[in-house]
Amino acid sequence: MMTMESLAEIYRTFAKREASGISPTYEAYAYSVAESGTLLELLLQLPSGKQQPNLLFAATRHVIGLPDHGEDFSQHVLRAWEEIMPVVLSRSTQTNEPGRCACFLPAFAQIEGPLSILEVGASAGLCLLPDLYGYDYGQSVLAPARPDGPIFPCKASAQTPLPQAHPQIAWRAGLDLNPLDVGKEEDMSWLKTLVWPEQKARRTRLEAAIEIAKSHPPRVVTGDLIAQTEALASEAPYGTRLVIFHTAVLNYVSPETRKEFAVLVKDLGAEWLANESVRTLPDVAPASILEAHPGAFVLSRNGRAIACTGPHGQFVEWL
């Protein structure tokens, strides 16, 4: 059972491991919450999945914006708690970061196409359009399919098998418990709010990806990863290679569900690409990655780690 001290420690850990050096704003907010017994008590009254820092910070910004310079974040929240709480309860951190496509692309390129791609936890489906974006790996640049398409920077190690062309995708679909609609301004406003305050370039690229998606609306079906994956996968055209992929999804389900999902994907005979935090798949992630990159993700193919990646696609280091 979550206690006030254990929840406070979650916010302190977020400040130290995730926000430090990346977002001074969110680092300060997290420490503020950790020191506010009143706010911690209110958060403890919410379901456990609704107590996380990213959700509280985004909901607050969505409803009342950032506090004035020098104003304590917790006091800012407490004054508007009755308006913030419904957003916390109704929304989730469906961070649809299209920059992560830069990390998936080398893996897609190693699979013989044409491909049928199915993303679990697809949010608005922006990661279902990897063949429309551009990528700057430092060593090489792959231009976007449209001149107005975003170009995602991703520092690649020398060992990374950089793609020379976009993957050939014959079919694509996504699955999400609560899909966001690229055509709905309210949904896209929430998606933009999930980008951390200092990350202005990242937000600009997200906005460009949303415009691409509006012209090529990705299909995202409402459903659970265990209950609906098989039915959706059965729609993939004959003669294509089915690839089931996801990023920052399995940390939201139980270890038992993770194991059940792994068996399901194997039984479907699909290629399985998982881009998850080091701690989510401890049996997959080498201990050396956790030591070198505590906040990193691990990209795995069919249960075997193949790369260390930045949580938002900032880098890819092939193993």
Image: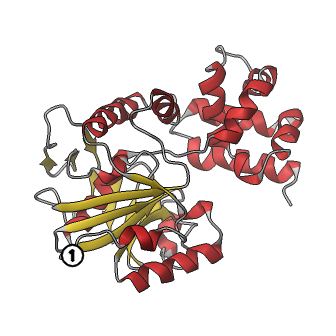
Percent x, y for residue 184?
Answer: 44, 31
Could you say which quadrant of the image residue 165 lies in?
Answer: bottom left
Could you say which quadrant of the image residue 78 lies in?
Answer: top right
Q: Nearer the viewer, residue 57 or 117?
A: 117
Side (left or right) of 52 relative to 169 = right
Percent x, y for residue 149?
Answer: 21, 36
| Residue found at x 40% / y 57% | 174
User: Which quadrant: the N terminus?
Assistant: bottom right
Q: Residues within 10 Å of mark 1 (few under 14, many from 20)?
A: few
- Is 109 drawn above or below residue 7 in the view shown? below
- Is 259 drawn above or below residue 148 in the view shown? below
| Residue found at x 49% / y 28% | 189
Could you say which quadrant of the image residue 211 lies in?
Answer: top left
Q: How many marks?
A: 1
Residue 156 in view of the camera: yes
| Residue found at x 82% / y 36% | 35
Side (left or right) of 280 relative to 195 = right
Scheme by which the image is coloured:
secondary structure
Q: Nearer the viewer, residue 297 or 145?
A: 145
> Which residue sits furthest bottom?
267
User: Which quadrant: the C terminus?
Assistant: bottom left
- Is 230 drawn above or below residue 35 in the view shown? below
Q: Nearer the viewer, residue 29 or 189?
A: 189
Q: Secondary structure at mark 1?
A: loop
Dot 1 amino acid type: Tyr
Side (left or right) of 16 relative to 189 = right
Percent x, y for residue 245?
Answer: 39, 65
Q: Nearer the viewer, residue 159 or 49?
A: 49
| Residue found at x 72% / y 29% | 84
Residue with the mark numbered 1 = 238
Residue 159 in view of the camera: no
